[in-house]
Image (spheres, rainbow, N blue to C red):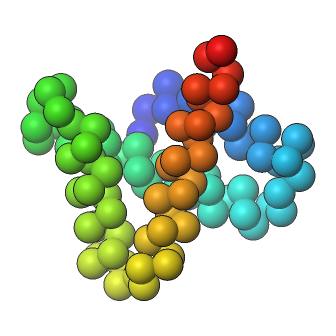
Amino acid sequence: MSDSDDHAITPYLDYLRYERRLSPRTCESYQRDLKDYLNCVHNTKQILGKRSHKHKSVSTWQMRIAVALALKACSVGYRLYAVCLITDYEKACAK
């Protein structure tokens, strides 16, 4: 993960900590999941090129965490939720 990725998720994690007042463990979980997802996005970009990587990176990441980590469907869902929430946050900030 690059420094720009850290800069992208830091404001969101601050929002979760200070405005939403989520527990430190929840914020740590979100941070771990987002960093893991961004690493997968970078790896998928390298394999597929820049074209059509977004959908592929989400499905690749979802399969990797489900299979490699032997997670139950609900755990995979929680991790996907973290990615969806930061997307919603970024859209709200862009307005």
Q: Position of residue 40 (x, y in %)?
A: 31, 49
Along the line of sight, the residue nearer the viewer: 76 or 37: 76
**Residue 75 image position (x, y, % from top left):** 50, 76
Q: Would residue 47 be found to the left or right of residue 53 on screen? A: left
Residue 52 sits in quarter: top left
Measured from the top left, where is residue 34 in percent x and y? Answer: 51, 50
Q: Residue at x 60, y 46 (%)?
A: 85
Q: Position of residue 77 (x, y in %)?
A: 48, 68
How many marks do you count on the picture?
0
Residue 18, quarter of the rendered image: top right
Q: At x 42% / y 79%, what residue is drawn?
A: 73
- Determine the residue positioned at 43% across, 54% down: 36
**Quarter residue 66 falls in:** bottom left
Q: Is residue 6 visible?
A: no
Is 33 above or below relative to 50? below
Residue 93 lies, with reference to residue 22, above or below; the image says above
From the image, which quarter does the N terminus lie in?
A: top left
Residue 78 shows in this picture: yes
On screen, residue 85 versus residue 36, left or right, reads: right
* 22 vs 14: above or below: below
Name the image quarter holding the C terminus: top right
Q: Residue furthest top?
A: 95
List the single residue furthest toward the left: 48
